[in-house]
Amino acid sequence: MATAPERQRGYLGRKAYRFLAALVFRDFRFLALASLSSGSGAWALIVARGAWVFSIPALQETWGLWVGLITFAAMSPRFFATPFIGYLADRVTRKTLLQWVYALQLAQASVMAVLVMIGIDNPWYVVALAVINGTLRATQQTAAQSVTPNLVDRERLPNAVALNEAMQQGSRAVGPAILLAVSIFVGGGAIFQAGGASFSIQNLVLTIGTSAVVFWACAVFYLVALFAALNIRTVSSGVIDRNRSFWSNTAAGFVYSYTTPLVFGIILMALAHCVLVMSFESMLPPLALEKLSADGVTFNQNDVYALMSALGIGALLSSVFVGGIVSHLTRGRVFLLLGFTSSLTPIGLGLSSQTGISVIAAVLMGLGTSGFMTITHTVIHSVVPDEIRGRVASVYSMHVGGSMAFANLLYGALADHWRAGLIMAVAGAAFTLVVVGTLVGSGFWRGIFFRGEARPVAAASPAGAD
Protein backbone atom coordinates (compact mmCIF):
# COMPACT_ATOMS: atom_id res chain seq x y z
CA MET A 1 0.00 0.00 0.00
CA ALA A 2 1.26 3.47 -0.84
CA THR A 3 2.19 5.88 1.87
CA ALA A 4 -0.20 8.78 2.27
CA PRO A 5 1.15 11.95 0.60
CA GLU A 6 2.27 14.78 2.85
CA ARG A 7 -0.12 17.73 3.02
CA GLN A 8 0.65 21.35 3.73
CA ARG A 9 -0.10 22.03 7.40
CA GLY A 10 -0.15 25.15 9.52
CA TYR A 11 1.84 25.50 12.76
CA LEU A 12 -0.78 23.78 14.91
CA GLY A 13 -1.25 21.11 12.27
CA ARG A 14 2.47 20.36 12.21
CA LYS A 15 2.57 20.10 16.00
CA ALA A 16 -0.47 17.79 16.07
CA TYR A 17 1.03 15.63 13.33
CA ARG A 18 4.30 15.34 15.23
CA PHE A 19 2.58 13.91 18.30
CA LEU A 20 -0.12 11.91 16.48
CA ALA A 21 1.75 10.90 13.32
CA ALA A 22 0.99 7.17 13.57
CA LEU A 23 -2.74 7.82 13.43
CA VAL A 24 -2.54 8.29 9.65
CA PHE A 25 -2.57 4.47 9.44
CA ARG A 26 -6.08 3.07 9.44
CA ASP A 27 -5.36 -0.19 11.25
CA PHE A 28 -3.33 1.58 13.91
CA ARG A 29 -6.28 3.89 14.60
CA PHE A 30 -8.44 0.85 15.34
CA LEU A 31 -5.70 -0.67 17.50
CA ALA A 32 -5.43 2.59 19.47
CA LEU A 33 -9.20 2.60 20.02
CA ALA A 34 -9.10 -1.03 21.14
CA SER A 35 -6.23 -0.33 23.54
CA LEU A 36 -7.97 2.72 25.00
CA SER A 37 -11.27 0.88 25.47
CA SER A 38 -9.82 -2.31 26.89
CA GLY A 39 -7.43 -0.38 29.14
CA SER A 40 -10.35 1.68 30.44
CA GLY A 41 -12.19 -1.53 31.25
CA ALA A 42 -9.16 -3.02 32.99
CA TRP A 43 -8.44 0.06 35.14
CA ALA A 44 -12.13 0.46 35.91
CA LEU A 45 -12.21 -3.14 37.11
CA ILE A 46 -9.15 -2.60 39.31
CA VAL A 47 -10.61 0.38 41.16
CA ALA A 48 -14.17 -1.04 41.19
CA ARG A 49 -13.02 -4.33 42.71
CA GLY A 50 -10.98 -2.48 45.34
CA ALA A 51 -13.88 -0.19 46.24
CA TRP A 52 -16.21 -3.21 46.31
CA VAL A 53 -14.00 -4.96 48.88
CA PHE A 54 -13.96 -1.82 51.03
CA SER A 55 -17.78 -1.83 51.01
CA ILE A 56 -18.01 -5.23 52.76
CA PRO A 57 -18.07 -4.70 56.56
CA ALA A 58 -17.10 -8.32 57.28
CA LEU A 59 -13.72 -7.73 55.62
CA GLN A 60 -12.95 -4.54 57.52
CA GLU A 61 -10.01 -5.94 59.49
CA THR A 62 -8.27 -7.22 56.36
CA TRP A 63 -9.38 -4.72 53.69
CA GLY A 64 -5.84 -3.99 52.55
CA LEU A 65 -4.89 -7.66 52.32
CA TRP A 66 -7.95 -8.51 50.23
CA VAL A 67 -7.41 -5.60 47.85
CA GLY A 68 -3.76 -6.64 47.56
CA LEU A 69 -4.75 -10.27 46.93
CA ILE A 70 -7.27 -9.35 44.22
CA THR A 71 -4.76 -7.01 42.58
CA PHE A 72 -2.11 -9.74 42.79
CA ALA A 73 -4.54 -12.18 41.16
CA ALA A 74 -5.13 -9.75 38.31
CA MET A 75 -1.42 -9.05 37.71
CA SER A 76 0.29 -12.35 38.51
CA PRO A 77 -0.62 -14.00 35.16
CA ARG A 78 1.83 -11.57 33.54
CA PHE A 79 4.51 -13.48 35.43
CA PHE A 80 3.23 -17.06 35.23
CA ALA A 81 1.57 -17.09 31.80
CA THR A 82 3.62 -14.74 29.65
CA PRO A 83 6.13 -17.31 28.32
CA PHE A 84 3.24 -19.17 26.70
CA ILE A 85 1.59 -15.89 25.69
CA GLY A 86 4.74 -14.69 23.95
CA TYR A 87 4.99 -17.95 22.03
CA LEU A 88 1.33 -17.60 21.07
CA ALA A 89 1.83 -14.00 19.87
CA ASP A 90 4.54 -15.20 17.46
CA ARG A 91 2.78 -18.45 16.54
CA VAL A 92 -0.74 -17.33 15.55
CA THR A 93 -2.14 -14.35 13.66
CA ARG A 94 -1.87 -11.42 16.04
CA LYS A 95 -5.11 -9.67 15.09
CA THR A 96 -7.05 -12.94 15.55
CA LEU A 97 -5.50 -13.37 18.98
CA LEU A 98 -6.61 -9.86 19.93
CA GLN A 99 -10.16 -10.53 18.76
CA TRP A 100 -10.49 -13.69 20.84
CA VAL A 101 -9.03 -11.97 23.89
CA TYR A 102 -11.51 -9.11 23.74
CA ALA A 103 -14.43 -11.50 23.31
CA LEU A 104 -13.36 -13.45 26.40
CA GLN A 105 -12.80 -10.22 28.35
CA LEU A 106 -16.34 -9.18 27.51
CA ALA A 107 -17.58 -12.52 28.86
CA GLN A 108 -15.65 -12.36 32.17
CA ALA A 109 -16.70 -8.75 32.84
CA SER A 110 -20.32 -9.73 32.23
CA VAL A 111 -20.02 -12.61 34.70
CA MET A 112 -18.65 -10.21 37.32
CA ALA A 113 -21.57 -7.86 36.73
CA VAL A 114 -24.08 -10.70 37.10
CA LEU A 115 -22.50 -11.84 40.39
CA VAL A 116 -22.83 -8.32 41.78
CA MET A 117 -26.41 -8.05 40.54
CA ILE A 118 -27.52 -11.16 42.42
CA GLY A 119 -25.79 -10.01 45.60
CA ILE A 120 -22.85 -12.43 45.88
CA ASP A 121 -20.18 -10.87 48.08
CA ASN A 122 -17.72 -13.76 48.38
CA PRO A 123 -14.32 -12.24 47.52
CA TRP A 124 -12.93 -15.57 46.33
CA TYR A 125 -15.19 -15.38 43.25
CA VAL A 126 -13.63 -12.03 42.50
CA VAL A 127 -10.13 -13.45 42.94
CA ALA A 128 -10.89 -16.21 40.42
CA LEU A 129 -12.31 -13.74 37.89
CA ALA A 130 -9.33 -11.45 38.47
CA VAL A 131 -6.97 -14.29 37.47
CA ILE A 132 -8.93 -14.77 34.24
CA ASN A 133 -8.98 -11.03 33.60
CA GLY A 134 -5.25 -10.76 34.25
CA THR A 135 -4.39 -13.65 31.94
CA LEU A 136 -6.43 -12.16 29.12
CA ARG A 137 -5.03 -8.67 29.73
CA ALA A 138 -1.47 -10.00 29.62
CA THR A 139 -2.27 -11.69 26.31
CA GLN A 140 -3.87 -8.54 24.91
CA GLN A 141 -0.94 -6.32 25.88
CA THR A 142 1.64 -8.67 24.39
CA ALA A 143 -0.34 -9.11 21.17
CA ALA A 144 -0.96 -5.35 20.83
CA GLN A 145 2.70 -4.53 21.42
CA SER A 146 3.75 -7.18 18.92
CA VAL A 147 1.37 -6.09 16.17
CA THR A 148 2.00 -2.33 16.51
CA PRO A 149 5.20 -2.29 14.39
CA ASN A 150 3.33 -4.16 11.64
CA LEU A 151 0.75 -1.38 11.30
CA VAL A 152 3.04 1.61 10.69
CA ASP A 153 6.23 2.43 8.82
CA ARG A 154 9.64 2.54 10.50
CA GLU A 155 9.77 6.32 10.67
CA ARG A 156 6.63 6.51 12.77
CA LEU A 157 7.23 3.39 14.86
CA PRO A 158 8.41 5.26 18.00
CA ASN A 159 5.31 7.44 17.81
CA ALA A 160 3.08 4.39 17.33
CA VAL A 161 4.59 2.58 20.33
CA ALA A 162 4.22 5.71 22.46
CA LEU A 163 0.62 6.31 21.35
CA ASN A 164 -0.33 2.70 22.05
CA GLU A 165 1.20 3.07 25.49
CA ALA A 166 -0.62 6.40 25.87
CA MET A 167 -3.89 4.60 25.25
CA GLN A 168 -3.00 1.98 27.85
CA GLN A 169 -1.82 4.46 30.47
CA GLY A 170 -4.29 7.24 29.64
CA SER A 171 -7.14 4.80 30.04
CA ARG A 172 -6.48 5.11 33.78
CA ALA A 173 -8.28 8.42 33.51
CA VAL A 174 -11.08 7.35 31.16
CA GLY A 175 -12.35 4.24 32.92
CA PRO A 176 -12.32 5.55 36.52
CA ALA A 177 -13.63 8.97 35.40
CA ILE A 178 -16.66 7.33 33.82
CA LEU A 179 -17.19 5.30 37.00
CA LEU A 180 -16.96 8.52 38.99
CA ALA A 181 -19.58 10.17 36.78
CA VAL A 182 -21.88 7.14 37.07
CA SER A 183 -21.37 6.95 40.82
CA ILE A 184 -22.23 10.63 41.31
CA PHE A 185 -25.25 10.36 39.02
CA VAL A 186 -26.66 7.20 40.58
CA GLY A 187 -25.61 7.92 44.15
CA GLY A 188 -22.19 6.97 45.46
CA GLY A 189 -23.43 5.63 48.77
CA ALA A 190 -25.59 3.02 47.08
CA ILE A 191 -23.49 1.97 44.13
CA PHE A 192 -22.08 -1.15 45.80
CA GLN A 193 -25.08 -2.20 47.87
CA ALA A 194 -26.05 -5.84 47.40
CA GLY A 195 -28.67 -6.30 44.70
CA GLY A 196 -31.71 -8.36 45.65
CA ALA A 197 -33.44 -10.83 43.36
CA SER A 198 -36.73 -9.25 42.30
CA PHE A 199 -38.73 -9.28 39.11
CA SER A 200 -40.46 -5.93 39.52
CA ILE A 201 -39.43 -3.30 36.97
CA GLN A 202 -38.65 -0.81 39.73
CA ASN A 203 -36.32 -3.15 41.60
CA LEU A 204 -34.68 -4.32 38.39
CA VAL A 205 -33.83 -0.75 37.41
CA LEU A 206 -32.60 -0.06 40.94
CA THR A 207 -30.40 -3.17 40.90
CA ILE A 208 -28.80 -2.38 37.56
CA GLY A 209 -28.46 1.29 38.40
CA THR A 210 -26.78 0.88 41.78
CA SER A 211 -25.10 -2.48 42.20
CA ALA A 212 -23.83 -3.67 38.85
CA VAL A 213 -23.74 -0.64 36.57
CA VAL A 214 -20.02 -0.19 37.25
CA PHE A 215 -19.19 -3.70 36.11
CA TRP A 216 -21.56 -3.56 33.14
CA ALA A 217 -19.71 -0.40 32.11
CA CYS A 218 -16.51 -2.45 32.13
CA ALA A 219 -18.18 -4.98 29.83
CA VAL A 220 -19.16 -2.18 27.45
CA PHE A 221 -15.52 -1.06 27.27
CA TYR A 222 -14.52 -4.56 26.12
CA LEU A 223 -17.36 -4.60 23.61
CA VAL A 224 -15.99 -1.43 21.99
CA ALA A 225 -12.50 -2.96 21.99
CA LEU A 226 -13.80 -6.08 20.26
CA PHE A 227 -15.50 -3.97 17.58
CA ALA A 228 -12.25 -2.08 16.94
CA ALA A 229 -10.15 -5.27 16.76
CA LEU A 230 -12.55 -6.83 14.26
CA ASN A 231 -11.81 -3.90 11.91
CA ILE A 232 -8.03 -4.48 11.83
CA ARG A 233 -7.05 -5.85 8.42
CA THR A 234 -3.29 -6.36 8.69
CA VAL A 235 -2.33 -10.03 9.03
CA SER A 236 0.97 -10.68 10.79
CA SER A 237 2.71 -13.19 13.02
CA GLY A 238 6.20 -13.95 14.23
CA VAL A 239 8.50 -16.73 13.08
CA ILE A 240 8.46 -19.98 15.03
CA ASP A 241 10.94 -22.76 14.23
CA ARG A 242 8.62 -25.75 13.89
CA ASN A 243 11.57 -28.12 14.17
CA ARG A 244 12.19 -26.93 17.72
CA SER A 245 10.09 -27.56 20.82
CA PHE A 246 7.84 -25.04 22.50
CA TRP A 247 10.38 -24.61 25.30
CA SER A 248 13.23 -24.08 22.87
CA ASN A 249 11.30 -21.44 20.93
CA THR A 250 10.21 -19.74 24.14
CA ALA A 251 13.76 -19.72 25.49
CA ALA A 252 14.85 -17.74 22.43
CA GLY A 253 13.02 -14.70 23.83
CA PHE A 254 14.83 -14.97 27.16
CA VAL A 255 18.20 -15.50 25.50
CA TYR A 256 17.75 -12.42 23.31
CA SER A 257 16.52 -10.30 26.25
CA TYR A 258 19.29 -11.34 28.63
CA THR A 259 22.16 -11.17 26.13
CA THR A 260 21.27 -7.83 24.53
CA PRO A 261 22.67 -5.23 26.97
CA LEU A 262 20.30 -2.44 25.98
CA VAL A 263 17.17 -4.62 26.30
CA PHE A 264 18.33 -6.23 29.54
CA GLY A 265 19.23 -2.88 31.08
CA ILE A 266 15.86 -1.36 30.18
CA ILE A 267 14.04 -4.39 31.61
CA LEU A 268 15.91 -4.13 34.91
CA MET A 269 15.21 -0.41 35.17
CA ALA A 270 11.51 -0.95 34.37
CA LEU A 271 11.37 -3.69 37.01
CA ALA A 272 12.77 -1.40 39.73
CA HIS A 273 10.42 1.38 38.62
CA CYS A 274 7.35 -0.86 38.76
CA VAL A 275 8.17 -2.34 42.16
CA LEU A 276 8.86 0.99 43.85
CA VAL A 277 6.61 3.61 42.26
CA MET A 278 3.95 1.94 40.09
CA SER A 279 2.55 -0.79 42.34
CA PHE A 280 0.06 1.47 44.09
CA GLU A 281 -3.25 -0.06 42.95
CA SER A 282 -3.75 -2.11 46.13
CA MET A 283 -3.20 1.05 48.21
CA LEU A 284 -5.67 3.24 46.33
CA PRO A 285 -8.64 2.76 48.69
CA PRO A 286 -6.70 3.49 51.92
CA LEU A 287 -4.75 6.24 50.17
CA ALA A 288 -7.98 7.87 48.99
CA LEU A 289 -9.30 7.60 52.54
CA GLU A 290 -6.20 9.34 53.89
CA LYS A 291 -5.88 12.07 51.27
CA LEU A 292 -9.36 12.85 49.95
CA SER A 293 -11.83 11.93 52.69
CA ALA A 294 -13.32 14.98 54.38
CA ASP A 295 -12.94 13.51 57.88
CA GLY A 296 -10.29 10.84 57.27
CA VAL A 297 -12.68 8.18 58.53
CA THR A 298 -15.58 7.89 56.08
CA PHE A 299 -14.73 5.88 52.98
CA ASN A 300 -16.27 6.92 49.65
CA GLN A 301 -15.46 5.02 46.47
CA ASN A 302 -15.79 8.28 44.53
CA ASP A 303 -12.48 9.32 46.10
CA VAL A 304 -10.82 6.20 44.66
CA TYR A 305 -12.14 6.99 41.17
CA ALA A 306 -11.02 10.61 41.48
CA LEU A 307 -7.51 9.64 42.60
CA MET A 308 -7.05 7.14 39.77
CA SER A 309 -8.45 9.65 37.26
CA ALA A 310 -5.90 12.24 38.41
CA LEU A 311 -3.10 9.71 37.87
CA GLY A 312 -4.55 8.86 34.45
CA ILE A 313 -4.70 12.48 33.29
CA GLY A 314 -0.99 12.89 33.92
CA ALA A 315 -0.30 9.52 32.30
CA LEU A 316 -2.14 10.44 29.11
CA LEU A 317 -0.41 13.80 28.74
CA SER A 318 3.10 12.46 29.24
CA SER A 319 2.62 9.44 26.96
CA VAL A 320 1.41 11.61 24.09
CA PHE A 321 4.27 14.06 24.69
CA VAL A 322 6.86 11.26 24.62
CA GLY A 323 5.36 10.06 21.35
CA GLY A 324 6.28 13.38 19.76
CA ILE A 325 9.98 13.15 20.64
CA VAL A 326 12.01 12.38 17.53
CA SER A 327 15.53 13.01 18.82
CA HIS A 328 17.29 10.13 20.60
CA LEU A 329 19.27 12.66 22.64
CA THR A 330 16.11 14.47 23.76
CA ARG A 331 14.41 11.17 24.57
CA GLY A 332 17.35 10.18 26.78
CA ARG A 333 17.28 13.43 28.73
CA VAL A 334 13.50 13.26 29.15
CA PHE A 335 13.95 9.67 30.34
CA LEU A 336 16.17 10.88 33.18
CA LEU A 337 13.84 13.77 34.03
CA LEU A 338 10.86 11.43 34.19
CA GLY A 339 12.85 9.07 36.39
CA PHE A 340 13.24 11.79 39.01
CA THR A 341 9.61 12.86 38.53
CA SER A 342 8.51 9.26 39.14
CA SER A 343 10.56 9.04 42.31
CA LEU A 344 9.82 12.42 43.91
CA THR A 345 6.07 12.74 43.28
CA PRO A 346 5.14 9.62 45.33
CA ILE A 347 6.98 11.22 48.23
CA GLY A 348 4.93 14.39 47.79
CA LEU A 349 1.67 12.46 47.51
CA GLY A 350 2.50 10.21 50.43
CA LEU A 351 3.40 13.05 52.79
CA SER A 352 0.73 15.53 51.64
CA SER A 353 -1.92 16.54 54.17
CA GLN A 354 -4.04 18.72 51.86
CA THR A 355 -6.52 17.47 49.27
CA GLY A 356 -5.52 19.93 46.55
CA ILE A 357 -1.82 19.15 46.87
CA SER A 358 -2.58 15.43 46.86
CA VAL A 359 -4.51 15.69 43.60
CA ILE A 360 -1.75 17.76 41.95
CA ALA A 361 0.86 15.26 43.18
CA ALA A 362 -1.23 12.41 41.74
CA VAL A 363 -1.38 14.10 38.32
CA LEU A 364 2.39 14.66 38.35
CA MET A 365 2.99 11.10 39.52
CA GLY A 366 0.93 9.75 36.63
CA LEU A 367 2.88 12.03 34.29
CA GLY A 368 6.24 10.76 35.54
CA THR A 369 5.51 7.04 35.81
CA SER A 370 3.66 6.72 32.51
CA GLY A 371 6.15 8.75 30.50
CA PHE A 372 9.01 6.74 31.97
CA MET A 373 7.39 3.42 31.05
CA THR A 374 6.43 4.70 27.59
CA ILE A 375 10.10 5.33 26.82
CA THR A 376 11.06 1.82 27.96
CA HIS A 377 8.41 0.39 25.61
CA THR A 378 9.55 2.62 22.76
CA VAL A 379 13.19 1.59 23.08
CA ILE A 380 12.50 -2.14 23.27
CA HIS A 381 10.01 -2.30 20.41
CA SER A 382 12.24 -0.17 18.20
CA VAL A 383 15.17 -2.52 18.75
CA VAL A 384 13.71 -6.04 18.76
CA PRO A 385 13.37 -7.89 15.40
CA ASP A 386 9.80 -8.60 14.33
CA GLU A 387 10.22 -12.38 14.19
CA ILE A 388 10.89 -12.58 17.93
CA ARG A 389 9.05 -9.49 19.15
CA GLY A 390 6.17 -11.38 20.76
CA ARG A 391 8.48 -13.49 22.89
CA VAL A 392 10.64 -10.54 23.96
CA ALA A 393 7.49 -8.54 24.75
CA SER A 394 6.39 -11.43 26.97
CA VAL A 395 9.76 -11.43 28.78
CA TYR A 396 9.39 -7.69 29.40
CA SER A 397 5.80 -8.17 30.53
CA MET A 398 6.77 -11.05 32.83
CA HIS A 399 9.32 -8.93 34.68
CA VAL A 400 7.14 -5.82 34.82
CA GLY A 401 3.79 -7.46 35.55
CA GLY A 402 5.17 -10.10 37.89
CA SER A 403 7.03 -7.55 39.99
CA MET A 404 3.92 -5.36 40.22
CA ALA A 405 1.78 -8.33 41.25
CA PHE A 406 3.99 -9.29 44.17
CA ALA A 407 4.61 -5.67 45.17
CA ASN A 408 0.86 -4.93 45.24
CA LEU A 409 0.29 -7.97 47.44
CA LEU A 410 2.99 -6.77 49.83
CA TYR A 411 1.85 -3.15 49.88
CA GLY A 412 -1.78 -4.14 50.38
CA ALA A 413 -0.86 -6.24 53.42
CA LEU A 414 1.37 -3.48 54.81
CA ALA A 415 -1.46 -0.94 54.43
CA ASP A 416 -3.39 -2.84 57.14
CA HIS A 417 -0.65 -1.87 59.62
CA TRP A 418 0.93 1.38 58.34
CA ARG A 419 -0.37 4.43 56.55
CA ALA A 420 -0.49 3.95 52.78
CA GLY A 421 1.00 7.41 52.30
CA LEU A 422 4.04 6.53 54.38
CA ILE A 423 4.60 3.32 52.41
CA MET A 424 4.39 5.24 49.13
CA ALA A 425 6.84 7.91 50.35
CA VAL A 426 9.42 5.33 51.45
CA ALA A 427 9.16 3.48 48.13
CA GLY A 428 9.56 6.75 46.22
CA ALA A 429 12.69 7.58 48.21
CA ALA A 430 14.10 4.15 47.36
CA PHE A 431 13.60 4.73 43.63
CA THR A 432 15.27 8.14 43.96
CA LEU A 433 18.38 6.28 45.11
CA VAL A 434 18.10 3.97 42.08
CA VAL A 435 18.01 6.92 39.66
CA VAL A 436 20.90 8.64 41.40
CA GLY A 437 22.81 5.37 41.27
CA THR A 438 22.53 5.26 37.47
CA LEU A 439 24.29 8.61 37.30
CA VAL A 440 27.22 7.65 39.51
CA GLY A 441 27.58 4.06 38.31
CA SER A 442 28.75 2.71 34.94
CA GLY A 443 28.65 4.73 31.76
CA PHE A 444 25.83 2.61 30.34
CA TRP A 445 23.02 4.78 31.69
CA ARG A 446 24.86 8.05 31.18
CA GLY A 447 25.20 7.07 27.53
CA ILE A 448 21.42 6.62 27.30
CA PHE A 449 20.59 9.78 29.24
CA PHE A 450 23.14 12.20 27.81
CA ARG A 451 24.27 10.76 24.47
CA GLY A 452 21.04 9.24 23.18
CA GLU A 453 22.56 5.78 22.72
CA ALA A 454 19.23 3.90 22.95
CA ARG A 455 18.79 3.76 19.18
CA PRO A 456 16.78 1.42 16.95
CA VAL A 457 18.85 -1.31 15.32
CA ALA A 458 16.14 -3.34 13.61
CA ALA A 459 13.59 -2.28 11.01
CA ALA A 460 9.89 -2.91 11.45
CA SER A 461 7.83 -4.66 8.81
CA PRO A 462 6.66 -2.21 6.15
CA ALA A 463 3.17 -0.84 6.38
CA GLY A 464 1.14 1.58 4.33
CA ALA A 465 -1.06 4.45 5.39
CA ASP A 466 -4.59 4.92 4.21
Image (spheres, helix red, strand yellow):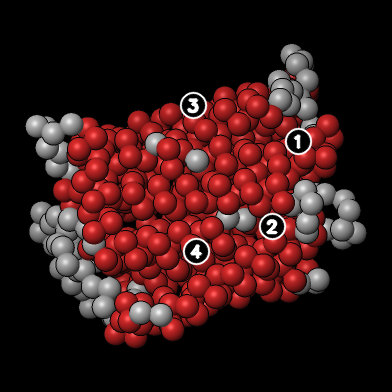
Amino acid type at mark 2: Ala
Q: Name the residue that disc number 1 marks.
A: 192
Name the side, left or right, on which 233 lies relative to 413: left
Q: Specify the label residue 306 is tagged with.
A: 2
Q: Specify the label residue 273 is tagged with.
A: 4
User: Image point 16% across, 48% down: which residue?
Assistant: 387
Query: Residue 357, image x and y in percent?
Result: 73, 74
Quarter of the image with the N terminus is bottom left
User: Image point 22% across, 32% down: which residue?
Assistant: 246
Please tell me which of labels 1 and 3 falls first in the chain: 3
Query: Residue 163, image x and y in percent?
Result: 37, 61
Q: Residues within 10 Å of mark 1 (few under 14, many from 20)?
A: many
Q: Residues within 10 Å of mark 3 (few under 14, many from 20)?
A: some
Please tell me which of labels 4 and 2 falls first in the chain: 4
Q: Specify the label residue 107 is tagged with.
A: 3
Q: Are marks 2 and 3 in contact (CB under 8 Å)?
A: no
